Image: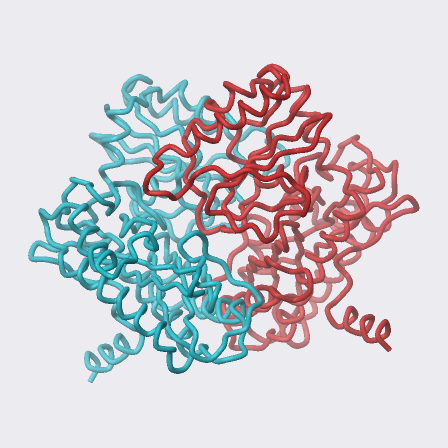
Chain colours: A cyan, B red
Amino acid sequence: MRAWIAWRPDEVLLLAGYFPFWGASLLIHFVDRDPILFVPQIEPRDHIPAGLSVEEYPWGDLKCSDPYSVLVSAVGDELVKAKISPEQAGMNPSASRTSLPIQAAEQIPMPEDFAGLLSAVAAKRDGRCRADFANLYLRKTSEEKRAIQLANRVANVGLEVFFENLQPGITEAEVGAAVESAIYREIGREGIFHSRGWAMVQSGANSADAGRFNRSTGRRLKNGELVLIELATCVNGYWSDLTRTAAVGSPEPEAASLLELVGEAQQAAIDAIRPGVSAGDIDAAARDKITAQGLASFFPHHTGHHVGFRYHDPGFLMVPGESAELEAGMVITIEPGVYIPERGAGARIEDNVVVTESGHEVLSRITGSEENEAKKRDQG
Amino acid sequence: MRAWIAWRPDEVLLLAGYFPFWGASLLIHFVDRDPILFVPQIEPRDHIPAGLSVEEYPWGDLKCSDPYSVLVSAVGDELVKAKISPEQAGMNPSASRTSLPIQAAEQIPMPEDFAGLLSAVAAKRDGRCRADFANLYLRKTSEEKRAIQLANRVANVGLEVFFENLQPGITEAEVGAAVESAIYREIGREGIFHSRGWAMVQSGANSADAGRFNRSTGRRLKNGELVLIELATCVNGYWSDLTRTAAVGSPEPEAASLLELVGEAQQAAIDAIRPGVSAGDIDAAARDKITAQGLASFFPHHTGHHVGFRYHDPGFLMVPGESAELEAGMVITIEPGVYIPERGAGARIEDNVVVTESGHEVLSRITGSEENEAKKRDQG
């Protein structure tokens, strides 16, 4: 393979460090020359990395009804110039399993068979070359690690608002709205041009559903019960995926013991993280704690997944029996959960952890206030 | 064609009145018998319309790695039972140009070739049957009209917050965050189980970009300048698409005249709406006003589109020369805009309008306060 044609937003981010606004950008990533980024003429230009060669194609122009044919033809010209045949150019034809771009309310209309159009100039899409590409998601560079850490810092600003709002009488939706709002408001702070959260809050009996789905309803919080927040945060294209569970006021005894168990299970899995450990062993570290309490059937999902370029990156899961091994540079979630409908209670705690040469570092435990303290120390 | 296999969220909404949570629901819509809805086992059940027959398929279960094959096989069984051959079952294979489901942070992972899998049981996808289906989006029922009106009422709650926040010193992102938060908080009010806004705010010189893209930055609002908000709102699956432009404090004279012109152009197009008028004539009503001021080249986009099942419904656009005619029951946007980079200013005003037998009704001009007043009158 001599070139990869990336048109899915997270592929463009991974290869060029650019997070598309409209989701209709295309990058020719050459093996042996500088990449070329194609953007629709309606794309903002101010966050395209300096030094990246950019070409525009018509879009949103009343005079051009078929922008994508213009794009594919321009891509073909560049490949011909580089003497690369369609069989030497790889691509992923799927429009699903990619991240939403910055404009996330609706996908930009693309031809239903855009991948088919594109295959006239980029035809290599066998499993081997696709699997090689998917492997690129697994090990993050130090620059990507910093970007994911920034997403986690912003997410923590939202989580502080979550904890502040745990008062009897407020609705789940009101709590979620406050959290998302705090995250959106971070736009404009140093280095942040895009910041969006999806905060889903489940209280009391609703928390028992959190292993199947996450959403906020109009239910009002009550004293002593558990409240769970699932929080996806995208900052400049990089993702954090966190969960917290806390009690409104003092937890009832059963709620407290559930929280404690999930916390212990999570810490056991985090403690096990280092290069060379299998994903199955990470899962077992958490799952064994829950099984020992006779609650195995109430922990129905994986213990973790890769994260960073998407809310859920491709790659192996932390599930029972998975033999794939952790390597330095990987960023994974650790998120055991126990959901007991009969008790009307569920709890999950999720953090994002980078595997380091010597063990691990939890990216999501730097809170906004800690960061502020650190800044003050730096300045003082 | 004897059955339509709907698996795209807005198709399921259109045919069954159900807005999928995960985006992985599938509806068999039979021509001559009751429909069947398939949902993943992780789907919430509380908003599935009463009386709709529901089957579940495995998903998110550690023990089932291939839920979609189970689903396709179950769909095939139902079609065989109804003696419907693959050639008699239609479907739209495209994963793009559909609405996001309730869980909008990331699309649920589907097999890249889900449509290919499905074609073993539903193979009819010629242009004619697809075009017939797309026509279903055009004329809304009175129930759908009410649902779109509700989305517009919620959007207006957000717009009131927009106007309240137009103060010097606040950032675009802070205004957008406040608007989205107000919309999210509506969840739990009577009849509202899902409410999400995408608010994009552009102030001063940034408003001149609003014909190409909409986003919020960290720029702070200044006295006298224009601020534009593009607001997409989804309530229970139905969409509103609105734009407002207003000045911070008293507008500068040039800003005031731009606002006035765009308002006049919009009103001219709205006034022209009635059954039998062509889309091109609607466009001309707005465009002529702008052309008469020598500003034709600063209005680069369509005057409107269909709306309701999606942020942008399929169907003809209000563009120059379009001969398709309006019919009662259609819901369209009217959104002329003028963006002048040299003046560092842009303005667009967008409303959602239903075509009635006798003319039209603007769905988006009922504000939250008017609605409250009306409620008080009803109760008093």
Any part of residue B97 in sight: no
Residue A86 at what x, y percent from top left? 33, 18
Residue found at x 48% / y 67%: A176
Observer-nearest residue: B175 or B15?
B15
Any part of residue B352 in sight: yes
Residue at the left extreme?
Answer: A358
Residue found at x 19% / y 78%: A378
Residue found at x 47% / y 69%: A204
Residue at the bottom extreme?
Answer: A380
Taking A86 as reference, is A241 above or below it?
A: below
Observer-nearest residue: A234 or B21?
B21
Asked whether, in this view, residue B197 is left or right of residue A24, the answer is right
Residue A10 at what x, y percent from top left? 35, 43
Observer-nearest residue: A229 or B360?
A229
**Quarter of the figure that contains the N terminus of chain A:** top left
Asked whether, in this view, residue B104 is left or right of residue B347, the answer is left
The image quarter containing residue B371 is bottom right
Taking B165 as reference, is B104 above or below it?
A: above
**Quarter of the figure that contains the C terminus of chain A:** bottom left
Residue B351 at what x, y percent from top left? 73, 54
Taking A303 as reference, is A24 above or below it?
A: above
